[in-house]
Image (cartoon, rainbow, N blue to C red):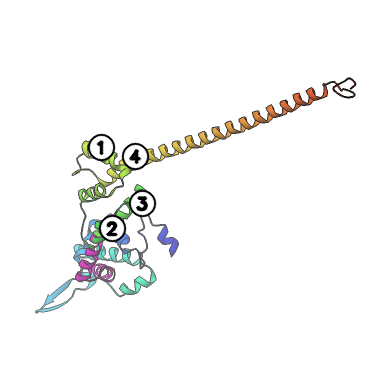
């Protein structure tokens, strides 16, 4: 089951478990649309079995009497329900295994993971607080900060509230570290922030961040080379001093051995 979740693709949405509903909902919505428009609409519109009225008595219409249009509607419902059933784990499936209508299954999951309208509003307020207090740390990368913003915006979207692109860009403008100040100012002067996409803005900052890292790396290399050169100079100086000391010792030794040896008193004569 775990492998199935990790290998989700364009033909197979991720597996819904107890921790990834917001991610799953966005993926599943796109997947249902990719099947066809009727399948996607069935999750919103729902489906009820066709009926007939005889003598003011309403009864379910026999399947063999369904029209082509009625067949297409129920097929869309069945496609959507089958898709939902096949992308939930066994614990989640217990919540919807008795559902025969895709809309009912979808809304059951929404209530289970998003709560009632009151709970949803409370969660949106919490997300708003998280968004407003979010700041980029001095040692944090642009990629990491962008992921934090996306987590909040995706969860907000799953709860029915879309954060505008302009709001997200201005959030980054207010909360970036000082090292990005010059780049941000340049972007503000050159771009229209009301139309600039967040991913484009972040890409510019990421490129600038890479140049900063390259500069720091070059400085570190320069410092290391300087230290190496200084150490080498010190070693050369020591080696030169040692060589001079050896030469001095040789000269003194040679001079000492060549002095004439005297016999008797140094001062001659009798008293």
Question: Residue 269 location, x and y as percent?
Answer: 89, 19
Residue bearing mark 4: 208
- Which residue is pictured at 42% across the width and 57% down the height? 7
Residue bearing mark 2: 152
Vertical position of residue 113 compared to residue 36: above or below: below
| Circle nearer the N terminus (2, 3) | 3
Label 4, label 3: how many angstroms apart (C-alpha)?
15 Å
What secondary structure is marked by label 2?
helix
Question: Residue 146 location, x and y as percent?
Answer: 32, 50
- Which residue is pictured at 27% across the width and 43% down the height? 201
Camera-side mark, 2 or 1: 1
Question: Quick check: marks 2 and 3 in contact, CB under 8 Å?
Answer: no
In the figure, residue 26 lies in which quadrant? bottom left
Residue 125 highlighted magenta (yes or no): yes
| Circle nearer the N terminus (2, 4) | 2
Residue placed most toward the observer, 47 or 129: 129
Vertical position of residue 148 compared to residue 75: above or below: above
Determine crowd level at label 3: few under 14, some 14-19, many 20+ residues with C-alpha closer than 10 A: few
Question: Residue 179 location, x and y as percent?
Answer: 33, 43
Question: Residue 42 location, x and y as percent?
Answer: 22, 63
- What range of the chain is rendered magenta? 102-128
Residue bearing mark 1: 186
């Amino acid at each position: 089951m775990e492998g199935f979740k990790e290998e989700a693709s364009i033909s197979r949405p991720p597996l819904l478990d107890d921790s990834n509903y917001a991610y799953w909902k966005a993926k599943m919505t796109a997947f249902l649309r990719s099947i066809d428009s009727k399948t996607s609409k069935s999750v919103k519109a729902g489906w009820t079995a066709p009926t007939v009225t005889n003598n003011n008595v309403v009864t379910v219409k026999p399947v063999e009497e369904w029209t082509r249009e009625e067949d297409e509607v129920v097929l869309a419902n069945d496609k959507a329900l089958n898709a939902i059933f096949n992308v939930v784990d066994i614990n989640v499936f217990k919540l919807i295994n008795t559902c025969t209508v895709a809309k009912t299954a979808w809304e059951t999951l929404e209530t289970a993971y998003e709560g009632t309208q009151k709970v949803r509003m409370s969660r949106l307020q919490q997300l708003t607080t998280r968004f407003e207090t979010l700041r980029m740390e001095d040692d944090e990368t642009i990629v990491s900060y962008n992921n934090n913003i996306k987590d909040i915006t995706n969860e907000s979207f799953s709860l029915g509230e879309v954060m505008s692109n302009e709001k997200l860009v201005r959030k980054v403008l207010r909360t970036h570290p000082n090292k990005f100040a010059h780049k941000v100012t340049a972007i503000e002067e050159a771009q229209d922030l009301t139309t600039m996409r967040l991913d484009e803005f972040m890409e510019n900052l990421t490129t600038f961040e890479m140049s900063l890292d390259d500069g720091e790396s070059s400085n570190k290399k320069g410092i290391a080379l300087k230290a190496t050169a200084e150490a080498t100079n010190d070693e050369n100086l020591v080696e030169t001093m040692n060589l001079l000391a050896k030469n001095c010792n040789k000269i003194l030794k040679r001079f000492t051995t060549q002095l004439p040896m005297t016999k008797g008193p140094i001062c001659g004569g009798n008293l």
